[in-house]
Image (spheres, rainbow, N blue to C red):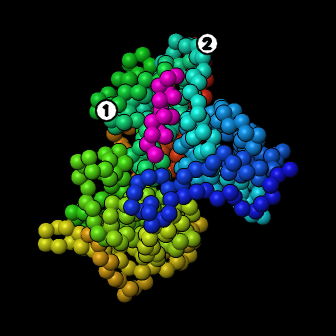
Amino acid sequence: MADLSPNKTAMPEQDPLVRNKNFDEVALGYTEEMAMKEAGRCLNCKNRPCVSGCPVNVQIPEFIALIKAGDFKAAYEKISETSSLPAVCGRVCPQESQCEGKCVRGIKGESVGIGRLERFAADWYMANCEREIPAIQPNGKKVAVIGAGPSGLTCAGDLAKLGYQVTIFEAFHTPGGVLVYGIPEFRLPKRIVAAEIDGLRKMGVEIMTDMVIGKVLSVDEIMDMGYDAVFIGSGAGLPMFMGIEGEGSVGVYSANEFLTRINLMKAYLEEYDTPIKKAARVAVVGGGNVAMDAARSAKRLGAEHVYIIYRRSEEEMPARKEEVHHAKEEEIEFKLLCNPVRVLADENGHVTGVECIRMELGEPDAGGRRRPVEIPGSEFVLEADSVIMALGTSPNPLIRTTTTGIEANKRGCLVVDENMQTTKEGVYAGGDAVTGAATVILAMGAGKSAAAAIDQYIREQKM
């Protein structure tokens, strides 16, 4: 019989006023006893609504039942049947709007902690087992994958299991994409990402780094190298700005640059000589997960005051509720219903503050959210010596502008058909390069779908 407790088993965490001074992981993970207790809350529904909410089709009731029975190795193996990155997904997926959002237990209480249990199974396996590499029969076909982020890694993993010789071309010196340059260590330890990628290498996936496609090689040149298909999973790393006065001042960062310097270039470690401004007062503009990551990182670098400036109310914030909750616990200050109109700077061009205007919510916009409207005469100045713009990103145009026959829409996203093939035959795309900035798990789902489409395409070419 299921445990009918209305609340999830609590996740142990670092104390907020301790963790906001270090980059160690915030959530400490379940013990075996905690995991089995939480697994006991699952009703094992016959219609399995949670599975319908998972973009990579993890067989959720089955892996939870295995945890409940104490067979943690089998639980991990069940997850791995459809997910290439279980330890990552268990940490950063927005479960509340996906699998857990469809959990029946959530109707009259809290949903089952599916993400916490996935993380537990993956961490337990890494700590206690040697990764078992499936026997793979090579099929003699080659596929190139551009980008070693979530979509590219997933596509590569699925194709490798089918016997393809897969080469990943990654622009940075370290594979992982947003998992290593965007998500901070305190949310996703980089050793976890490295371990997941190591598993792909053991399956025979070759990863070539420092390969900026569009500069070092073009997609056309890659296709001429004997690859039977190409998958573009290059993400959306081109930052957006507001276009306001003073935005070019010293101390203004895009969130991408700020987080890349911290996460990939280790600016938070004294032994790394990575230039970054460690400001006393930091203003972060935006209300998504990236804004939360930037604000919490700035606090850990020693800022006395870190402000989130967001033009709508908290209810409209796109960030995960858990991330907002953690930010508040860590003394991040929220300036809601405000919008920057000018960045202030001194005579040397260094940031001294942000002039903002107060907002109120008007009629709903096309997306259904109430449109923020300026309140005339409500301007005020917020003192700051650094400003971080976390306003979203779009795909870098480099690949599409250096490849013949690839079309993009007005947002710069690659155009694909129902089979995820671009307007160039044999070239597929998925993840943020197609959708614009989205979640890790949606990018993984796209990589998985693309792998199946590429396999079908190549098989049809042989016929």
* Residue 73 appears anywhere in the view: yes
Q: Provide the residue designation for mark 2.
A: 463
Q: Provide the residue designation for mark 1.
A: 210
Q: Which of these two is toward me, 404 or 151? A: 151
- Name which of mark 2 and mark 1 comes first in the sequence: 1
Q: Which of these two is toward me, 119 or 394? A: 119
Numbered disc 2: secondary structure: loop
| Relative image position of residue 50 (x, y in whole percent) | 72, 48
Numbered disc 1: secondary structure: loop
| Relative image position of residue 56 (x, y in whole percent) | 63, 39
Q: Is residue 192 magenta?
A: yes
Q: Is residue 199 magenta?
A: yes
* Residue 229 appears anywhere in the view: no
Q: Residue at horizontal 62%, vertical 44%?
A: 120
Q: Amino acid at mark 1?
A: Asp
Q: Residue at horizontal 57%, vertical 71%?
A: 315
Q: Residue furthest right?
A: 1
Q: Which residues are magenta?
A: 189-203
Q: Amino acid at mark 2?
A: Met
Tell me where residue 23 sits by quadrant.
Answer: bottom left
How far apart are labels 2 and 1 at the CA level?
37 Å
Location of the C terminus (image quadrant) = top right
Neighbourhood count class around disc 1 (C-alpha, 10 Å): few under 14, some 14–19, many 20 upward: few
Q: Is residue 426 above or below residue 283?
A: above
Q: Residue furthest left?
A: 347
Count of numbered tags: 2
The dot on residue 448 is none
Our reading of the magenta stretch's main secondary structure is helix
Q: Residue at horizontal 32%, vertical 78%?
A: 382
